[in-house]
Image (cartoon, helix red, strand yellow):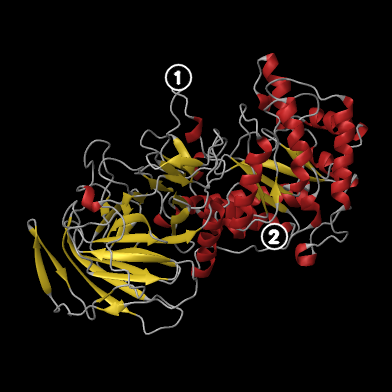
Amino acid sequence: MGNRGAAPSAQPYREAVPAGLRMKRAGFTVAVVLGILLAGAASGNAQTPEGSSMREAAAFQASLPAYEVRLLNQTDLGPVPALEIYRNGQFLFRLPLISGLDSANAHEHLSDIRYHIHRSAGGPGAAYEIVATAKSTLWTQREFHWRLYADHLEFDQAASGDGKIGRCFFFSDGRPGRWDKGESDGGAWNTTLMADRYWTPSPNHANQWEFSIAEPQSLGFGPGREGSEEDFRPARMTGLFSPPPLMLAFHRGGEWATIGIGTHPGDYRFPSLEYSGSRYAGAAWWVDYLGYQTVRSVPGGEFRSPVAAIHFAYSALDALAYYTAWLRKSGFGTEARYPDVRWYHLPVFCGWAEQTSTAVPKGLPPNSESTQKNYEAWVAELDQRHLPIGTIVIDDKWQKGYGSFDIDQQKWPDLKGFVAAQHASGRHVLLWVPVAHTDGLPSNLCIHDQSGKCVAPDLGNPAYESFLRKKIRYLVQTVGVDGFKEDWVWAPNAAGWPVPPQLAGIEAVRKFQGILYSETHRWKPDAMIETQTPNAAFRDSSDVLRLNDVWYATRDVVGMMRERARIAHISGWPLVDTDNASSTTLESWWQYMEAQPSIGIPALYFVHRTESTLQAPPDWMWEALAGIWRDYIATLPAANTNAGGTGESHDEGH
């Protein structure tokens, strides 16, 4: 089955099934409507595939270059048509042919399932298409589409009617329960997983990439599942890539298959892709529109779901590569808008760990140490060590309010002068900023909850966008900063806020990041926006991807950060900021400092000692680090590329 590119092989049944043949199944009708009923692999293997239902002959089966499928009109679990997926003889999934679409306040039930199968006449498109319909308790019309390509499958669903949309399910009609059917209509309506483990592209603070299929997973900005202080769950402390690629890679016996989703930019109107974990009644995936998206009985008012795709591979990263290529080909991602610039690659000093190691022993918050006086002293000390710093990141909290973008004049009396001094030394300066924060934001630019609390900026309000753009312009054009480093990325994941549907969920982050990116580059085309969003929908508003924080208990920092970097590269970011291992031990920190140039942009976060163990590097480490960085800089291209040719250019290096 590894014969990629070969034509699909199928042959007709010996006896055609009459159109409209109906089979009574446990209280409701399943209708099979086939123009031409196709089945059978040309290999001549007539045995029932491993793990399949023995009581039900396949209504359709086909062998394609990357996988095999069998369509059953029912299974032992119940009277719901199901598609079984095989890879090189390994049974991987049994998927119900249709999936549920809840409203904001009611669960959908489906019945009277009908389907027909089309075979392609050839060409690069789908070899087969399966179109199903069903009666719904919520919507006036329901349709489900499967497309079987040579190397992958696609599924999406559509609905017409009137109402607000809640959860849109994939390969399920509801979340299964741990001990019962839960919110679904039973095991026949959910996915049966034969894989034993899965890999996630979303890093966590346990540094765990693989999970049992029983473990749930949230990809994006889903509900908090981190546990409590007493019930500590570092494997569920995600958000380091936010959002990550919206896919999981399942494997069994060396065979890998992804389940991931994509839609057109502008339609990511949900906070996350959720995976239930495999439970008593099976598994489910869903996105939650939280009532912001509506269906209307008017032309163009129908709902069409994101597309779910299943790709096949030989490793986790191979699976991610197939998924990412599909996103781009399908128009579900974006492309970089500005070219790479040499100064992006130069070593970084960010003061966060120095702020922490200075403040915490004194019982002070780390952000209290983000002052001009401190940063000037720290930079001077790094100069004495001959460290060739190219970029300074001023971390939390240089501003009065996280959301106001106003300079705190008491802590930074002359930020413009500090930036000018760094430019004179051949350096660039970035400011750390959280995404869509409300701290310091005028009330008239807020979204308020029912209690009157400001819970988010009003991203749909032209006055907020004008406010934000004015602040960014001042910092870039007048103060002279060279860009921003994003952090604390979040999206609304609660219902009932006065949020327009086009700015719900992930689209809210895209909106904020788009404003930050476009306004910064408008006034300085060679500026840098550094983000933690390795999702293809964000490539057009991000220059560099940061690998993000390292948890205190991490020891194999190098291996863990290499994996993060590989995910970023595959997802479309060739250049990554390595961040730092300052929160671990001195030994782990030094191992990572040595490895950084082979991973991405080298970065240093402290001047005196590590963040949690408070260990000070000996002089020889500082001397060695200066040499490592000089050798790294020597490998960079000599020319500096100014994006657009109008940005401010400085001599890099020191």
- List the residue tagged with mark 2: 522
Residue 223 at least partly seen: yes
Q: Of residues 22 and 269, which is closer to you in this image?
A: 22
Residue 232 horizontal/vertical position (percent): 47, 25
SS state under label 2: helix
Find residue 138 and report its image quarter. Answer: bottom left
Please state which amino acid type lies under the numbered disc 1. Answer: Glu
Where does the C terminus fall, quadrant-wise?
top right
Tell which circle, 1 or 2, labels the residue nearer the N-terminal end.
Answer: 1
Neighbourhood count class around disc 2 (C-alpha, 10 Å): few under 14, some 14–19, many 20 upward: some
Q: Is residue 492 visible?
A: no
In the foreground, 391 or 462: 391
How many dots with numbers? 2
Furthest-top residue in this view:
362
Q: Secondary structure at mark 1?
A: loop
Q: Amino acid at mark 2?
A: Arg
Which image quadrant for residue 378?
top right
Judge left or right: residue 536 versus residue 211.
right
The N terminus lies in quadrant: bottom left
Residue drawn at x 47%, y 21% is 229
Q: Nearer the viewer, residue 163 or 79?
A: 79
Is the C-beta separation of discs 1 and 2 under 8 Å? Answer: no
Question: Against 340, is 375 above or below?
Answer: above
Q: Residue at x 44, y 62 (%)?
A: 263
Q: Is residue 27 above or below residue 218?
A: below
Please give the label number shown on residue 230: 1
* Horizontal and vertical percent position of residue 508: 49, 51
Q: CA distance from mark 1 to mark 2?
A: 48 Å
Q: Is residue 423 left or right of residue 21?
A: right
**Looking at the image, residue 238 lies above or below residue 3:** above
* Residue drawn where x is 46% and y is 60% of the image: 312
